[in-house]
Every structure is written in C-alpha cells, then in structure tokens.
Image (cartoon, coloured by chain):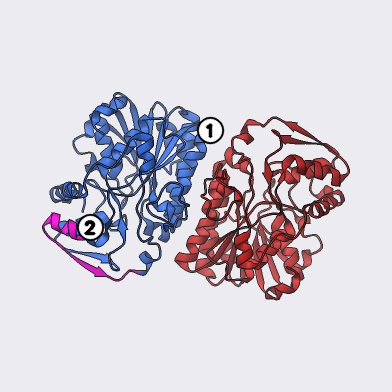
Chain colours: A blue, B red
Amino acid sequence: MNDECWGYYANRRVLITGGLGFIGSNLARRLVGLGSQVLLVDSLVPDYGGNRFNIAGIEDRVTVNIADVRDPHAMNALVPGHDVLFNLAGQVSHLDSMADPFTDLEINARSQLFILEACRLHNPAIKIVYAGTRQSYGRPLYLPLDEEHRNRPTDINGVNKLAGEWYHLVYGHAHGLRTCSLRLTNTYGPRQLMKHSRQGFIAWFVRQAVEGREIQVYGDGQQRRDLTYVDDVVDAFLAAGASDAANGQVLNLGGQAPISLLELAHLIVEIAGQGSVRLIPWPDERRRIDVGDVYSSYELIQRTLGWQPQTPLRAGLTRMVQFYQEHRRHYW
Amino acid sequence: MNDECWGYYANRRVLITGGLGFIGSNLARRLVGLGSQVLLVDSLVPDYGGNRFNIAGIEDRVTVNIADVRDPHAMNALVPGHDVLFNLAGQVSHLDSMADPFTDLEINARSQLFILEACRLHNPAIKIVYAGTRQSYGRPLYLPLDEEHRNRPTDINGVNKLAGEWYHLVYGHAHGLRTCSLRLTNTYGPRQLMKHSRQGFIAWFVRQAVEGREIQVYGDGQQRRDLTYVDDVVDAFLAAGASDAANGQVLNLGGQAPISLLELAHLIVEIAGQGSVRLIPWPDERRRIDVGDVYSSYELIQRTLGWQPQTPLRAGLTRMVQFYQEHRRHYW
C-alpha cells in the first residue's frame, strides 16, 4: 500500500490514544502527511511507551492532550467530533501484569469501557480500531495461528487485553458502534520504548547491540516468532480505519517468515556491526508465561483489507538500528 | 454419585463465595451433611441471588460472613485456614451487564483478582473451584459445545466472566494455585432467585406457572438449551474440589437431551398444573445478545471426574415447582 490509497484521511479528524507511544506516534506521523487533523491522547506514565521525542518534527501539526484513559471523564470530552479513533493506549508488559494485575486491569479492561461508553454516548458514528494482541491465543495448538484458534492467554495482560478487545466487539454488535480489532504480533521499528526490557525482546536486543553489549537469549533460542515492521502496522491501522469491511472482526497481523530468536539476535548484531550473542537459562518468571513458537496467519486481513507485510526484516531492522544510533539519548 | 463418595469433605474447612445464593446454598447444605465446616461469604446485594432463607434449617451449622467480594481486604482475612474455596460470587445478569458494565467488571473481573491474590498470599495450598459459564463460547460454531470451541462472548457479562475464569487459570500455571473452572449451563432447582426475570428464563417460567400466569416465550420458541439440575451441579463442584485431576482445566457441565424453550414452558405448565404459554416477538435488548441453540458436551468432565447429569428433567422441575409452591413467600 502506498499513500495514494489513503485519500480517505485528508481533513479527517483522528484521535489516537497512546498517541505518544511507539505505534501511535508512527501512525500520527503518517496521518499528518495525509492531511488529517490529529489529536494525540497520552498519559506519559513513566516506564510506558509515551515519549515526546516521538513526535519531533510534527509537534506543530498535531494536538497533544495529556490524559490517562483511566480518567473516566477525559474521554467524554475528547471523543466528540472525531471521525476515527485508533485505540492504542495500553499497559503492554506481560511481566508487569503479573506483578501488578490491578493496574493492568484498570488500563487494559476498565478504561476500554470508559472509552467505548464515551463513544456510545457522545459520538456513536466514530470508527474505532483497537490494538489487540496475538498473545490472546496463548500456547498455540497449531501454526500459523488463525482467528478461529481458541484463546487461552497465559498471563494477566493477555486476559485483560482480550477483555478490552471483546468489549469493542460487544459494543459493535449490541450498540452498533463500528469497531474492529487488529491482533498485533511482535512489532518493531523506530520510536519503541528502550528504557527497560519488560516490553518485549526486539527493542532490548537492538539496544544491547547498539551499545556494543551482549544479547542474552533464553534457552536454546530456537523459539520462532514473526515480526512486523511498524510502518506495515501503520498501514494495517489506516486500512482498517478507512473501511467498514473490518467492522465486528478480529484480524491478525503477521510477519514474513518466522525467525528464531537466536537467528534474530545474530542478525541484529550483524546489522549494528557490534555486540554479541549468548544463550542463558530461562529465568523462572519468564519461562512460566512464555508461549514457545508463535506466528500468525494474515490471510484474513489480506482477504478483507488487502493488507500484507511489505518490509523485509533486514531492511526494517536496519532502519531501526540507524534510528537508535542517531537518537539514543532520547530513548535510553 | 452418592454421598458415600465424598468422605473427603468430612471435617474439611470449606469457603463458599456467593454462599447464600442459589448454587452456593445448595452446595452448603450438602457439605453440612458431609461433615464440613462451612463458611459462607455473601454480599446480600439486593436483586442478586443471596437469600437468608436459602440456609433455613442449617443456620446453626454454618458460619455466615456478610462481605462483598469487591472489598479488597475481606478476602485476605477470610481465606486463611480453608481447604477448599468454591468461588461462586458473581453478577449473573447478562442484561444488567449491558446497562451497567462497570459493576459487572468490578464483581466478575476485578474482585476475582482480589480473591486470587488473597489465596496466593495467604493460603496458596487452598483448592479453588470457579463457577464459569457456557455463555463464554458465544454463538456456537458447532454443537454440542466442547472445551476447544473458540470463545466469543456476546455481552459484557460473558467477557468479564471469562476474564475471571482465566485469572484462575493464570494463577494456576504461573503461581501454582490449584484452580479449575466449571462452565455451567442453565442450572435450575430450588433456591434460585425469583424476584425478577433478569437472571435467566427457567426460574421466570416456573414463577409464572406457579402463579397461574402466562409464560411468554420469545420468537418461535424453538431455540434449544440443555438444563442441569442444581443437585447435579453440586456433585460436579464436590468432585472438582476433591480431586487434583481437574487442576488447570476448564470443564463443561451439560444437561441431558436439549429441549426447546417452547417445550420447556409447556412441561412446566403441565407439572405446575396451571399457567399457560404464549409466543411473543423478541424484545430488541434481548435479541441482540441471544445466542440461539446452545448445549454442551460433558464428555471431558465425565472422563476427568466421572461426573454426568443424573436428574431427569421432569423430576428436577417437579421438585423445583413443589419447592416454590411451598416457599414462595421467601422468594417472590
């Protein structure tokens, strides 16, 4: 897909929750280029993904509203007048959800009800695209995962993200809201949180390599994952937001061929031109919620919206590594 | 199963949340007979199922503690020292969950985390049996529903009950708690709430017949359901509580042959010796969250715990009708 496809977004009023975060800010940058009027809502909770540097260069072309989706009133005031809501605010750390399940529930479940109620009451015509997660499937019964695979999340974050997703579907069929969910795989690229390792392995691998350090891979490193470059994820959100074909649906994103974590670590070291790789035993707290080999089928979204991943892994990782080599002081 | 099977429960300390409710109180009555020391926790929230008359005759042989599972401290104080927790407290009305999704979330999701945290911190050896619901599957892709059927709840209550169930499973595999969930179908029998029609159709049908009124059945009345008599449900809880074979599992209950709602209404009228039946159009708010024909396979619990439904529908309904003919003043 290229930007000519997205005439829909010219002059549209678009609201992004989690708008200063990784995917939200990349989406905002594209939307600004497409001529949308963009409102970014973000809590800037420390340790989460929000980062003002993520909108460097477009600060004057977006509106930023600092608010927490846990605030029951903020969304009532912010939702009216918008055409599309990209609902990306979330607590994304699986480990944090196990240490503090209540905060995870507040953000990923309860706040989603605030947002949906705000839309139902104050802007029922708005189109809503929710950021779901492949983690909802839990340990795969078969691969690649398709949307009919049963859900059995292995951690509290997976449970609450799924509740948040299903609220969207329930508000769709019961209240007529135009909602859908994209189940993201491992997304990577510029503007990802790098401060700690609790939001996923790719960013952490890249940070170690950019610092010339050792990348530690758990177990034998043979567990395979698919990765989606953030620009491709942005394409999927744009496609879902502009089309009613996705309404009421859960759609998997997916990457190109799955890669083992060990291969990935070596590839990142090669691209960065520094760093090293070492296998270490699983830490208990991570082993217990790990899901093994996982990758998704994107056949349904391809059929429904014409989306497929475009960015080769090496190209995406190269852009990511270069971004952090240049901008690390804003992310470390 | 008969009571000789349940030597396990002699002198056991058993905690039942929702203990003054329909299933909780029937379970308590059996446990008292088996020699357990029973603590019933119930909020007695008006319009929910708790009713002091449900323990008439055993008041002196159980301990009652009025507390709301939404109270974050109560469970910490109540959980220690117990061998088994039957976790039955819940908001069970699908319609109420759509009108007030936040209360449903507080009770069916957030409070379950309080309960599980209390167990993890203060009594990690306790055995926990959670009351899940067949509603979690949503509209069936095939029948009878088995445990591998994908979940797609159609209302907020279904979402939150599923979150509550999965918290139990996550605390099982991640924290080592001995948890399992029984997914109940339509349970019927004595001590069920009769004050309003928002907790299911069977009780409401019985009330109309006992009052000699007209039973209104939606649509053509051909939607089929399976029903489980409460004594059989109690057997399933006892079996799950006494065995570690169910740990980490979700197990469907099921009824004998499914019956259409129209046939059921006529059967109830016949048993009650009064009342009548009329088909009426679907009210919109109910049609939107209805799931059509639904019935479950109980093959897995039969294989795992030896459970199967024992009570013929006519016998169960006869006992239910007689109970309310005698005790209606305590339930209307």
Q: Secondary structure at mark 2?
A: helix
Relative to B129, is A185 above or below? Answer: above
Q: Position of residue A217 (x, y in %)?
A: 26, 65
Name the amino acid type tagged 2: Leu
Task: Decide if residue A106 is in sight here.
Answer: no
Task: Decide if residue A192 is in sight here.
Answer: yes
On the rendered image, what quadrant is the C terminus of chain B found in? top right
Relative to B201, is B288 above or below? Answer: above
Q: Position of residue A278 (x, y in %)?
A: 21, 68
Relative to A277, is B147 above or below? Answer: above
Badge 2: chain ID: A
Q: Looking at this rendering, what residue extends furthest in the right direction?
A: B273
Q: Position of residue A285 (x, y in %)?
A: 38, 66
Q: Position of residue A267 (x, y in %)?
A: 18, 57
Q: Nearer the viewer, residue A323 or A298?
A: A298
Residue B128 inside the magenta-drawn segment: no
Residue A268 inside the magenta-drawn segment: yes
| Residue underneath mark 1 | A175
Label 1, residues with CA under 10 Å away: few <14, some 14-19, many ≥20: some
The tag earlier along the polypeptide, 2 or 1, is 1
Residue A87: mark in rendering: none
| Residue underneath mark 2 | A264
Name the amino acid type tagged 1: His
On the rendered image, what quadrant is the N terminus of chain B found in? bottom right
Q: Residue at x 86, y 49 (%)?
A: B325
Q: Residue at x 24, y 30 (%)?
A: A3
In the rendered structure, which segment of residues is drawn in magenta? Answer: A264-283
Q: Does residue B22 appear to the left or right of A34 in the view shown?
A: right
